Amino acid sequence: MQSLFYNNYSGSQAFTGDFNVPEVHHAIALHPLKEPALMHAMYKYFKRQEMADLYDRIQLLLRNGDRNLLASHFAGQMFPKSSSLLEPRCGSATATNVWRFFQAQFAYCSGASECPRHRMKSRQTYAVKDVAYQIVDMMNKYGRQRGRMVEYQNTLYGYWRVEPTIGADYILDLLLMYKRLKGKKTSMLVRRHVYLRQPFLPLQATDAIDTSHSIDADDLAMTTVHVIVPLHKRLASLQRFVAHLEMHCLRNGENVALIVVLFPSNDSDADLHIAETLHNLKALYRKQSNISLVVLDKQPFNRALALSQGAQLCPVGSLMFFADVDMLFTRQLLRRIRQNTIKGRQVFFPVVFSEYKPASGKQNHFSHFHTNGHFRYFGFGLVSLFREDFDAVGGMNTNIRGWGLEDVDLFEKFLHHPTISIFRAPEPDLIHVYHEVTCDPGLPPLQLRMCKGRKADGYLSKQRLTEIVGPMLNNETKVQ
């Protein structure tokens, strides 16, 4: 009875996580479920499950050869032939689709930047658990009539791959709890090896076009991007940032506003030069762009506080871009910021190309060779978002002191928001220029470890490191 009328005792966290759990699947009533956003999310989840069940029935008819029956009921629609689990023939060794192996929380692979071992991403864990639950549901479909049921316990190990034209293939070793319901009732743990494929849906086209968020190209260009830059010292970096912004954006008539939030240093002359640099830029483009300098006196540098103060200066409805003084970008980035940031629906966390320490003083910052730098997939400091969405998640956590973590905190807030999604992709027109990183020994252990990792990550590429260290290990180079 408790499983049918399920009561979640997690308080305010009830049903805020994954819906794909046995408690939700087996219940006919869920409590407490009173938040409209959660109710809507639950409704969409069950609708997706219903669509998946209908598609499974269609596939079953196809496998049984009832294609003519389907054609009479669904005139004009194309249904693919039921795919086989047999290995597709490959024309060459390079065309072979290699399986990926996973066990516990780790996946093992080859040929990718994250290999040979990496922690499984949440979407991969979700996909494996989802197919495992589907298998158990199929096994239990007539379980009560047959007097036995199984419960999913764990996936001991498995393989997966994706065939782009077919679907996702899995080989899973499942740990199940077998329960006999008739005769002598017993329960025991059993292992089952399963082979399955999740075929992709057929390609479909529709005449219904959602124009509620379509933006005219001219209107898109008219949207002002408010760039907010926290600053402490770093006069030379600011001068480089301003010169690049002027050359690539302001001279081309881009609608961009710049807000610099300055934490004063002990060098009053440097701070004065910073103010003069921004004053001169403002005088040149007074009619075109809004250039502002905010000074936060008598406070240690706090990036979260600087971004929050800068956001308060932006009018309601403003499109904001949280940047750093070490960044360089072109007008193409501004266009993609406008395209990829949707008010109330989507924020844009671009993946930044981070330079390695250059071998010489001169370098083409927009050269994306693997020896020059790498895309920093685990950096979340750069984001474009609307002022209302920033306020909706509670803004930045200004209590975080020192280097790092404030960006991760904001990212996780959007990650758990019920209506705002995250768009994340490599951005070739956004470059983080190399600079020396100094890690304060007084930082909390987690922030200190992250800072040291970031520092080590920016020295040089793995290939260059191999070229230097390899001969040393082989005694081919004398260490001076």
Image (tube, rainbow, N blue to C red):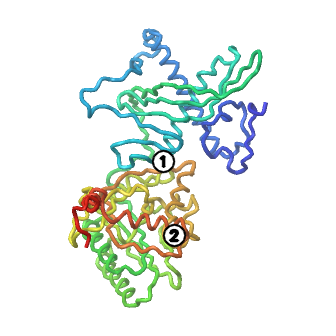
Q: In the structure shown, which secondary structural element does the residue marked by tag 1 occupy? A: strand
Q: In the structure shown, which secondary structural element does the residue marked by tag 2 occupy? A: helix
The residue at 51%/57% (across/down) is: 411
Residue type marked 2: Ala
Residue bearing the label numbered 1: 119
- Is 45 left or right of 96, judged from the image as shown? right
| The residue positioned farthest toward the front in the image shown | 475
Residue type marked 1: Arg
The residue at 51%/73% (across/down) is: 402
**Dot 2, how many residues are within 10 Å of its Cα: few (below 14), some (14-19), or many (20+)?**
many
Tell me, for residue 304, which label it has, or none: 2
Q: Nearer the viewer, residue 291 or 26?
A: 26
Up-down: is 204 above or below 254? above
The residue at 43%/13% (across/down) is: 71
- For the residues labelled 1 and 2, the Cα–Cα distance comes to 29 Å
The residue at 34%/55% (across/down) is: 427
